[in-house]
Amino acid sequence: MSIYAIGDIQGCYSAFRKLLDKIRFDPASDQLWLVGDLVNRGGKSLEVLRLVYALQDSCISVLGNHDLHFLAVANNTKKHSHNPELHEILRADDGQLLLNWLQQRPLLHVDEHLRMIMVHAGIAPDWDLPLAKKLTRKVQKTLQGKRAKELLDKMYGNRPARWSADLKWLEQRRAIINVCTRMRFCRADGSLDFTAKGPPASGKKGSRPWYELPRRTADHTILFGHWSALGLYFGHQVVCLDSGGVWGNKLTAMSLGEDFRLWQVKGQHG
């Protein structure tokens, strides 16, 4: 069995299909890891979701910030009424099926055999793996439960800047979501800094890319996306696979395990 990880697709269906063809992906024998952000901006989010859903028995996908935004759109279409690409999914005959499937996706995937963690944006440097698993399960359980709409409606915001067990219910979950799906820069105390979104050099004084801080999950390699301005990156025992496909750059696939290889196709809308 071969395992392939692919960066942020964001509705770029044609590029996704070309990349699957290029790696000769066989759902009968191979496994696909997707780092999140399946939807939004690329023009063909409905087609991407349909394809990933069809491959679900051989595919593991974690939630990204754009995926969560789609869930929020579905939760409150009046509040988020400006995105025709996402509303196309909701109008489709199979839209509810795809929405329900996406809402069941986790924030975190761990493979102990490979010693790898997959998450959309990263893991807080001061979280060890048991804590990361515990916190992400809290969010997953909420998204699959009776308070899902409440969370989706109120998850937006940059505060609190750091998770703590002393935080209230909503603040805890917002902090966890921000770490796993939006984080780029951290201050020395591990608090999130959202004042910059560009490449690592764009960080403000006192902030560094999250993966440069000493982290308690250093015995695992973290595989993530989200940061197109960082691009394809290997270092500090992390791998960023967001090579900016939706912006006309490359969509990247990487084989995991002993047979390490990279494949890329030109990113494109649609």
Image: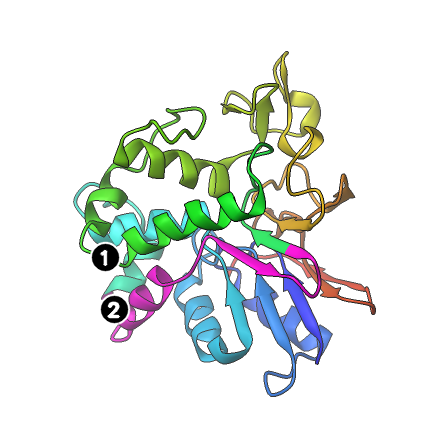
Type of amino acid at the residue the image marks with label 2: Gln
- Callout 1: few (<14), some (14-19), or many (20+) C-alpha neighbours within 10 Å? few
Which numbered circle lies on residue 145? 1
Q: Nearer the viewer, mark 1 or mark 2?
A: 1
> How many numbered marks does the figure carry?
2
Q: Is residue 256 left or right of residue 141?
A: right
Residue 4 higher or lower than 190, as above or below:
below
> In terms of secondary structure, where does tag 1 sit?
loop
Amino acid at circle 1: Gly
Task: Tell me if I can see residue 8 in this picture.
Answer: yes
Q: Is residue 27 above or below residue 241?
A: below
Coordinates of residue 7 in the picture (x, y in percent): 61, 56
The reply to whether the magenta stretch includes residue 29 is no
Write the residue at 42% across / 68% down. Answer: 49
Residue found at x 35% / y 47%: 69
Among numbered discs 1 and 2, the one appearing first in the sequence: 2
- SS at circle 2: helix
Q: Which residue is mark 2?
A: 96
Q: Is there a contact, CB below 8 Å, between mark 1 and mark 2?
A: no
Q: Which residues are magenta?
A: 91-116
Q: Residue at x 43, y 74 (%)?
A: 53
Expressed as whole percent of the image width and height from the top left, the position of residue 42 reads 49, 55
> Farthest bottom residue?
28
The x and y percentages for residue 112 are 65, 62
Where does the N terminus fall, quadrant-wise? bottom right
In-front residue for pair 252/33:
33
Residue found farthest to the top: 205
